[in-house]
Image (cartoon, rainbow, N blue to C red):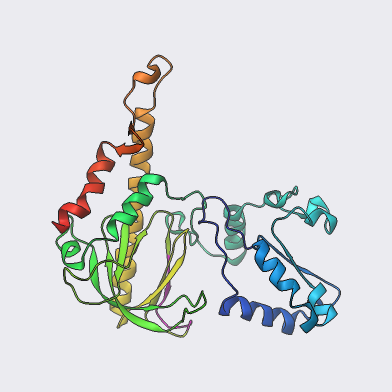
Amino acid sequence: EVKPREGCSRTTFRFPDKGTKQMMDIQKQHYPSSQYGAATHVCGVPRTFQWAFALCRPFMSKESYEALILRTDYTHLPKHLPKSSILKEWGGEVEWDLGKYVEWRAKEEGVTLDPANVRRFDPTASQDEAMTDMTESFKSISAAALQKWDPAPAKMGPVEKQGSGQGWFATTKWKTKLLSAGPPGFACYFDSDKISEANTATRAIALFGAFIEEDIQGAGGKKNAFTLVTPQRTYKFAAADKAGAEAWVAALRGGIQEATVQHAESHNMLKEMAPTPSQGNGSTAKRAEVGSSTVLEGPMADMMKAPAEATN
């Protein structure tokens, strides 16, 4: 399944990265039968990629080519499997709950779960229009203005960031960036580690639905590392020492909690503003239509103004 589910990210496709290739090597080494007499179905690829793969047929063995089936959706699966073996999301009958699986697996392994820190993102945590607007607005803020923000970022300083390695010219090299755990509910990083007006945010990251994975001991190849996993993408950082990494993890987890509170408050606000049958169209709405533009009102509007005011 390579097509993002609703609420997880925009519909995109990237060519296989290092991790995907390693998975294929493991499959070949430890499950050799999967290479012959069995098939791997890759569902959700763009049609153009499906056509491009067909051009590779003359350069592949018949067994390898037929063992890899690329399709744009899941409609072909019932021809190969009974519906009782296919997930409901794929057009089958199987219901699989990730939360229940994690709970069962933890019980089997004798692990105590912390419900407040389950290591997975919330698949319902898609950004609404207002949140997307705020994320884009924060990208224009300078490091100097953000440092003066009220409330100030929980932590701000240089870290190393690993490239995603996804894309034609992308790399997995580590480069120094300026990271900020703030504004509240967000994180930002800058290409330069200098705090100045000229240094504007490279990316603003909404923290709602995110979680942190620690790798202080360097099992992944880099000591004092920590990974920020959001519904949209994953960011891997590393601090200079163990204390620094632990401080960043604490600051970012605090930002995730703030984002959760903000999300709950905005939903409660929308419920209060929703018109009742007796109110009809005369109730106060969150958005006001002016010509072809949409104007935000209330607390959300005040938050949207903050980056510009801080910059000025």
Q: Residue at x 30, y 39 (%)?
A: 296
Front residue of this view, candidates 255 and 296 = 296
User: Measured from the top left, where is residue 225 in percent x and y?
Assistant: 39, 78
Q: Is residue 288 left or right of residue 101?
A: left
Q: Residue at x 44, y 55 (%)?
A: 209
Front residue of this view, candidates 177 and 261 = 177
Vertical arrangement, residue 272 with respect to residue 131, above or below: above
Q: Residue at x 31, y 70 (%)?
A: 248
Would you identify the image quadrant in which residue 27 lies? bottom right
User: Measured from the top left, where is residue 82 in percent x and y?
Assistant: 83, 53
Vertical arrangement, residue 264 with respect to residue 230, above or below: above
Residue at the farthest top position: 278
Tell me the quadrant of the picture where the C terminus can be found.
bottom left
Q: Is residue 300 left or right of residue 101?
A: left
User: Measured from the top left, where is residue 307 in percent x and y?
Assistant: 22, 54
Would you identify the image quadrant in which residue 98 lies? bottom right
Q: Is residue 234 left or right of residue 50?
A: left
Q: Residue at x 73, y 84 (%)?
A: 29
Is residue 17 one of those drawn in magenta? Answer: no
User: Measured from the top left, where is residue 230 in percent x and y?
Assistant: 44, 61
Tell me the quadrant of the picture where the N terminus can be found.
bottom right
Q: Is residue 153 visible?
A: yes
How many numbered badges does the structure rendering display?
0
Q: What range of the chain is rendered magenta?
A: 212-220
Vertical arrangement, residue 93 with respect to residue 112, above or below: above
Is residue 216 one of those drawn in magenta? Answer: yes
